[in-house]
Amino acid sequence: DMVAAVSVGMVRGNLLVDLDGAEEHMDENEAADIPVAMVPSTEEITLLQMDGVVTKEDLTVALNMVKPGLKFIAEKQREALQNKYKNIGDQQ
């Protein structure tokens, strides 16, 4: 399986997936930024880092929000690797 990663954060009271730099610094009180890496098939979290403050409830919601995106990212990573190396065995 593959590890996929994305960020989620709280900006102006709203949880957003895949924050960019502008969104991270949009709130004068500094937005919460939470990078998450996960093995999508097992939903095992392999990285969880948080800069800023969110409630336990918001963190739970945020982690549930990233799961579909992480599964999508892992599938695209898998497809890219398969396309890159699909002819390797034929060349030998």
Image (cartoon, helix red, strand yellow):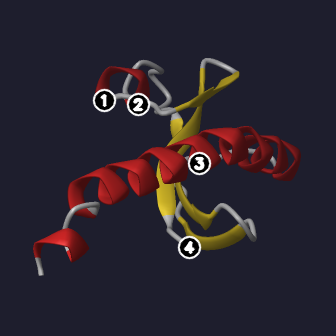
Residue 71 image point, x, y percent: 63, 49
Q: In the structure shown, which secondary structural element does the residue marked by tag 3 occupy?
A: helix
**Residue drawn at 61 percent across, 39 percent down:** 69
Q: Locate the C terminus and report the quarter of the image it occupies.
A: bottom left
> How far is the residue under mark 1 from the one under mark 4?
29 Å
> How far is the residue under mark 1 from the one under mark 2?
5 Å
Q: Amino acid at mark 2?
A: Glu
Residue tagged by mark 2?
24
- Towards the viewer: 53 or 6: 6
| Residue 70: mark in rendering | 3
Q: Amino acid at mark 4?
A: Asp
Q: Amino acid at mark 3?
A: Leu
Q: Label 4: how many residues lie within 10 Å, few (<14), some (14-19) or many (20+)?
A: few
> How far is the residue under mark 1 from the one under mark 3?
20 Å
Going from N to C along the chain, the mark reached first, 1 or 4, is 4
Residue tagged by mark 1?
21
